[in-house]
Amino acid sequence: MNNPLVDDRLVDLLLREVHPLEKLCTLPHFRDHDVSGMELYLENLRRFARDVLFPTYRRMDAQPPDWKDGQVRVHRDMHELYPRMLELGVVSATRPNAVGGHQLPMTVATAGHAYLMAANVSVCGFFGLTGGAAHLLEAFGDEDIQRKFMDPLYSGRWTGTMALTEPQAGSSLADIATRATPDPTASDPRRFRIVGNKTFISGGDHDITENIVHLTLARIDGAPAGSKGISLFAVPKRREEAGKLVGNDVCVTGLIHKLGWRGLPSTVLSFGESNDCIGYLVGEPHRGLSHMFQMMNEARILVGLNATGTASAAYQEALAYAKTRTQGRPVTERNVSRPQVPIIEHADVRRMLLRQKAIVEGSLALLITTAWYADLAEHDEDERRRRHAKGMLDLLTPIAKNFPAEWGFEATTLALQVHGGYGYSTEYLPECWMRDQKLNTIHEGTTGIQGLDLLGRRAVAEGGASLAALRRDVVTTVDLAARAGLEPAWGHAVLSSLDEAIALTQELGGRGLAGDVDGMLLHGYDYLTMMSIIVVAWQHLEIATAARSSSRQADERWAAGLLESARYWICTELPRTKHLASLCRTAESSYQTMESAWF
């Protein structure tokens, strides 16, 4: 089946009408680019994703990496894909020319990389991790650290990982136990001996490049307990001695066999079994967790983009199947001699397809919007606009991770459902995508953690300044929607839901200030769900406005479909926010009062 993976028309609408590339080209940081060059980058990624990357997906899923004689070996296709992906510039697409990057807007990279992730998410994992590790060194490493590690990462000679999780700590990074002791044999005060274990390290070992750099959290001897005593280290698989790469006492002790993402190895690593593992301090001592949040926040947005790509590919597959698979007849047809109809003619199949469509379109718009704010937060010339964009980026990050992951999993299961019994078989792709999709709700902070982060920190920060910024932008969209002739009730519903959420946030924040933090955060999951629904309703309103007002819209039927997606989301999903707000406000306590012994 010829799967387009991502809808080109939607991407073009978002980059021409909603977040026009012409505006980004006016910013000094992007002055060396023009719209035609950015569109050429997108077109190159589209072709590569469809013609080269997607055909490898099934093979890599069927034959995961293996671990033999202490070495992880990835699928043979990965060896051919790796240099070709480097040629596309995906590792350093958005980084400055000064560090070997292409200085492209994040908005463009996000749109383009969605195609790659839809084609083969495991392959993209290597590059996302490597780029994130290099950017961390760019931000916090000194010149020597950058020369040692950042330059080889950005060039793709080496790959990178984030080594945070430990078996006894899981997501509770305050409980990590990996130790860092100053190296008594070295004159360099940044050189430490590292001893500890890390688990679930994606890309932690492979046979693609000569070296891997693990950005590792550890405790310097004598450091304070908890998160305030964590430092950040660059720990290479092989270190340089006398101009040569030698072993650095980093050992693979296990290969995790995963439900999905099978092309990207997930490893258990041991550092310093022979007390000869050297790590190099990055940034300030005991500030490692705050440094690492840069990479973690970037990774959360990448997870959202991964989930969007997977849901999009699954939707396109289900749509094509529904148009060609014939089965049954209209419920009013009594003549069994009449030919069967494509299943898309059945109302319940259209229901499932429209829900997938609304989720995918909302997810893609959300991720491109988040990238747009990232570009403005860093590069807009006006300080007030930069501050506004920074607040929006901070607020949207957990939503950009959560919505595509949670709703994207639902969308992918619907793609399987559209295929019926064939979807449940391994002969068709939806079951592969469903397995891949589940991880997105777990890694880089589970949905529960994202809810605590959004409500407990981001939404209430500075007296709710980021929510006020969101309201200003929503009001602008509502005004534009009215001018475009959209139903006024749509804009009213989105804005009134947001106003109720803002009032609820103020009330919950007051509880926290009064000392009832448990009561404030009890329904963090429901709060995140509520805010996700509202933000995506706003995104659908933006898409519908652009579809209605665009002078370049050639396909009226496709534009009408965008309007129906918006109608569906605003009319069927947005009303849920009232119930979710009620749960948060009343602090419904069933799972708080449920005692462990009662389960």
Image (cartoon, helix red, strand yellow):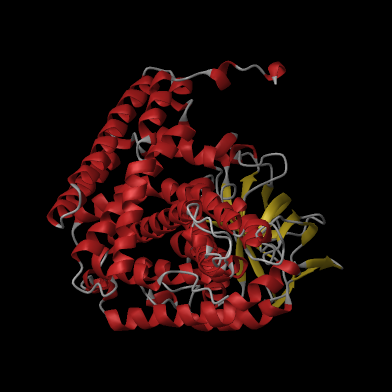
**The quarter of the displayed image where residue 498 is located:** top left
| Viewer-proximal residue among 285 and 327 | 327
Question: Residue shown at 69%/53% (left/top)?
Answer: 200
**Relative to 243, 483 lies left or right:** left
Name the residue at the right extreme: 69
Question: Residue shown at 72%/39% (left/top)?
Answer: 168
**The quarter of the displayed image where residue 493 is located:** top left
Res 294 seen here: no
Residue 504 in picture, x, y percent from top left: 32, 27
User: Quadrant where the N terminus lies?
Assistant: bottom right
**The quarter of the displayed image where residue 54 is located:** bottom right
| Viewer-proximal residue among 219 and 319 | 319
| Viewer-proximal residue among 542 and 450 | 542
Residue 345 in picture, x, y percent from top left: 47, 60
**Relative to 540, 179 lies left or right:** right
Residue 476 in picture, x, y percent from top left: 17, 50
**Relative to 385, 197 lies left or right:** right
Answer above or below: position of 242 versus 597.
below
Res 156 seen here: yes
Answer above or below: position of 12 versus 495.
below
User: Quadrant where the C terminus lies?
Assistant: top right
Question: Residue shown at 44%/83% (left/top)?
Answer: 44
Name the residue at the left extreme: 483
Image mark count: 0
Residue 532 in picture, x, y percent from top left: 40, 43
